[in-house]
Image (cartoon, rainbow, N blue to C red):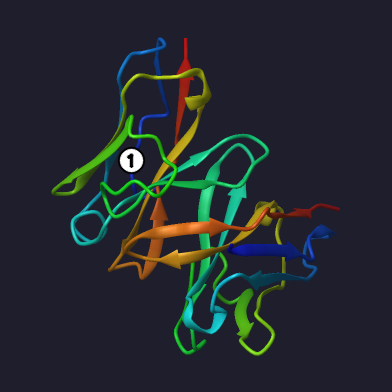
Amino acid sequence: EVQLLESGGGLVQPGGSLRLSCAASGFTFSDSAMYWVRLVPGKGLEWVSAISSSGFNIYYADSVRGRFTIYRDNSKNLLYLQMNNLRAEDTAFYYCAKGDKINGWGSWGQGALVTVSS
Amino acid sequence: QSVLTQPPSASGTPGQRVTISCSGGSSNIGSNTVNWYQHLPGTAPKLLMSSNNQRPSGVPDRFSGSKSGTSASLAISGLQSEDEADYYCAAWDDSLKAYVFGAGTEVTVL
């Protein structure tokens, strides 16, 4: 059974940093592209970033490019999202997800809440 | 403003058919598959419809999807109370090099 477990969320001041982690199990992590998607309260779902199975290909939403960094450790089955220079509009539940661009994201974690506020 | 356009709300009585539209462009829906997600408050989103019209395992067959040109739709036949949720369409956009979502449609069962 595929399991994804996010951690690292919390309250941070504007301009601060957080690192989210996603621990994966139940599938061959090193063969899977991975994604971060956020749910902004009152606004809806927004794709944040994607990373290929090797980590070679990386994509970001315009809203986070230059501030967020996605990376992975295939030896530890871990996915990360380093978030710097956080803004109030980054407040959201952050989910890691597994899937592909054709068939969608069939597996999701339970989410990590990030609140950016002074 | 979302790249994909969905109606903000839809409703129906139990047993009715409800259809949610998703309109995009040549670089997203026109070139790539559409996936639909269901979100219930307090839970993680769930993949409801894959690759335009494929139901993942466990999704009831009252849900169906279709795509034509730069538009897609999700239909719920035989609406049930547990179908009250937010529904989002999504697709990869070749021009933006990004995944794009619709703003979501809130389905209410009257």
- The tally of labels here is 1
Q: Which residue is mark 1?
A: B5
Which residue is painted at 54% across and 79% down in the image? A28
Which residue is painted at 30% across and 52% down in the image? B34
In which quadrant will I find the N terminus of chain B?
A: top left
Question: What is the secondary structure assignment of the residue under circle 1?
Answer: loop
User: How far across and how far down the image is residue A5, in percent?
Assistant: 70, 63
Which residue is painted at 52% across and 24% down in the image? B82
User: How far across and how far down the image is residue A90, in percent?
Assistant: 66, 56
Mark 1 nearby-residue class (10 Å; few <14, some 14–19, many ≥20): many
The answer to whether residue A33 is above or below residue A42 is: below
Q: Is residue B101 left or right of residue B94?
A: right
Which residue is painted at 78% across and 71% down in the image? A17
Q: Is residue A6 left or right of residue B82?
A: right
Q: Chain of mark 1?
A: B
In the picture, residue B63 is in which quadrant? top left
The answer to whether residue B2 is above or below residue B79 is: below
Name the residue nearer the viewer: B96 or B48: B48
User: How far across and how far down the image is residue A106, in percent?
Assistant: 47, 57
User: How far across and how far down the image is residue B73, in percent?
Assistant: 26, 37
Q: Which amino acid lies under the numbered mark 1 shown in the image of this protein?
A: Thr
Name the residue nearer the viewer: A102 or B97: A102
